[in-house]
Image (cartoon, rainbow, N blue to C red):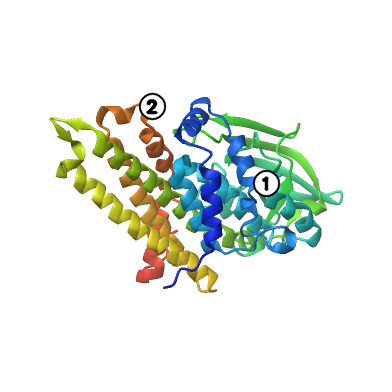
Amino acid sequence: MDFKYDKSVVEKVRAVSSKFDEKYWRDVYGKHEFPHEYWDAIADAGLFGLVISQEYGGWGKSLLDLAIGTAETAERFSGIGSYLFLSGCLVSTIFSKSSKDQKKEILPKLAKGEIKVSLALSEEKSGFDATSLETKAEKFSGGYRINGSKRFVNNVDNADYLVVFARTKPIEQSGKKSTGVSMFLVPPKGANIKSKKLDKLGMDFVNNFDLEIRDLYVKGDALVAELDNAWYNAVESFNMDRVVTAASLVGTGKLALNTASEYARDRVVFGKPIGSNQGIQFPLAEAAAQLITAEMMMLKAATMFGQGQNFIQAANLALYESINAASYATERALQTFGGHGYYKDYDVERYWRDVRVHKVHPISEELLLASIAERSLGLPKSY
C-alpha cells in the first residue's frame, strides 16, 4: 500500500515542535496548566485547519496527513500532548453535516485555533454504552431545555463551546438506542452548568470535569447537524479519532523508546553502558518492533479512509495495536531508567502515566477486542 502524504505538513509540525522541548512540557505538567503557548503556535502555523476544507479556511488535507502530523508532534517531546493537535482538528468533522450558517460561524474559527470546543458525551451510568445516555433536551419556547449530567469532559475551563449530546426522543419511541440523540452547541459556563474538576493519574496538561446541567435553555440554532441523528452524524469522527489517537500513541511510544535508548547508551554501570546488555537491548528492540507494526496498521487505516474504503475494522486494529505497543514501550523505558525512572526529572514516568488512560478511553481494550471478534471472526455481538 502506497502511503501518500504531504511532506510540508511534517516540516511545519517539526518547525513548531522544535520550539517546545522536554523542559517546557515538564513545567506544564508540573503546574497542571494548559499549554497555551503550544496551542497558539499550532494555531499560528494553521495546523488546526488540516482536515477542514479550504472553503472554510482550512488546508483540505487527508486523515493520513493529520495522523502523520500527530505522530510527529507526539514524538517531539509533547507525547500525548499531541491530543491538543488532533482534538482541534477532528472536532471540525462533527460539524460536517451542520447548517451552512453554523459552518460559517464555527469552522473558520476552528481552523485558526481561535476557539476550543469540547465534547460532552460520557455519563456515569452509560459509560461505553454511549447511546444509553440519560441527558434530555426537550423542545421549549422555540429552542430546547437541557437537563442531565456528564462525565470526563475535557478542558471545560478553557473551552469556548461544548457539544452536548442529549436524548431528544425517548428510546421507546426511537426504535433503537442509536437514534433519538442530538447534539447542541452550548457555552461551557453559566448559572445552569455546574462543573467539578476531577483528579486523575496523568495527562496533567488538560483538566477533566463532571458537569451538572439544569434547565439550560438553548435556541433552535444551537442544534448541531440533524435532529435525532447525532450518533450517525458523529460516528465517522469517532472512528477517525481512533486512527489519530493511534498515531499519538505511536509517537509517544517512539518518544519513550528514544529517551530510553539514549539513556542506555550513556548510562555506565559495572564499567560499560547498560545498553550493551541484552537484558536491556531485547525489551527495547521488542518495543521497537511492536511500534513499527502499530504504525503500519495506523497508516493503513488512514489510507483506507482516504480511499473511501470501509476502515472501521482497520481503525480498531490500529488503536488496539498502538495501545499495547505504546504501553510496552513506556513500561520498558521506565524500567531501563531503573530507580531514576520513578522520578519526574526524567520524564519517562509521565509518558507511562499518559499512555495508561488509553487502555480504557475513549474505548476499552476489551471492547476493541469484542468488535474485532465480531467483524473478523464472525462471532456473536457481545455488547
- Residue 176, image quadrant: bottom right
- Residue 66, image quadrant: bottom right
Residue bearing the label numbered 2? 345
Q: Residues within 10 Å of mark 2 (few under 14, many from 20)?
A: few
Q: Residue at the spot x=67%, y=39% of the render?
A: 159
Q: From the viewer's perspective, is residue 225 above or below residue 193?
A: below
Report how far apart the C-alphas of labels 1 and 2 lie in the structure.
31 Å
Q: Residue at the spot x=60%, y=55% of the render?
A: 90
Q: Nearer the viewer, residue 347 or 214?
A: 347
- Percent across and percent down for residue 359 are 40, 47
Q: How many marks?
A: 2
Q: What is the quadrant of the C terminus in the image?
A: bottom left
- Identified by mark 2, the residue type is Asp
Left or right of 140 in this view: 176: left
- Identified by mark 1, the residue type is Gly
Residue bearing the label numbered 1? 113
Left or right of 332 in this view: 160: right
Q: Secondary structure at mark 2?
A: helix
Query: Mark 1 or mark 2: which comes first in sequence?
Result: 1
Kindly give the residue lying farthest to the left in the view shown.
270
Kindly give the residue lying farthest to the right in the view shown.
141
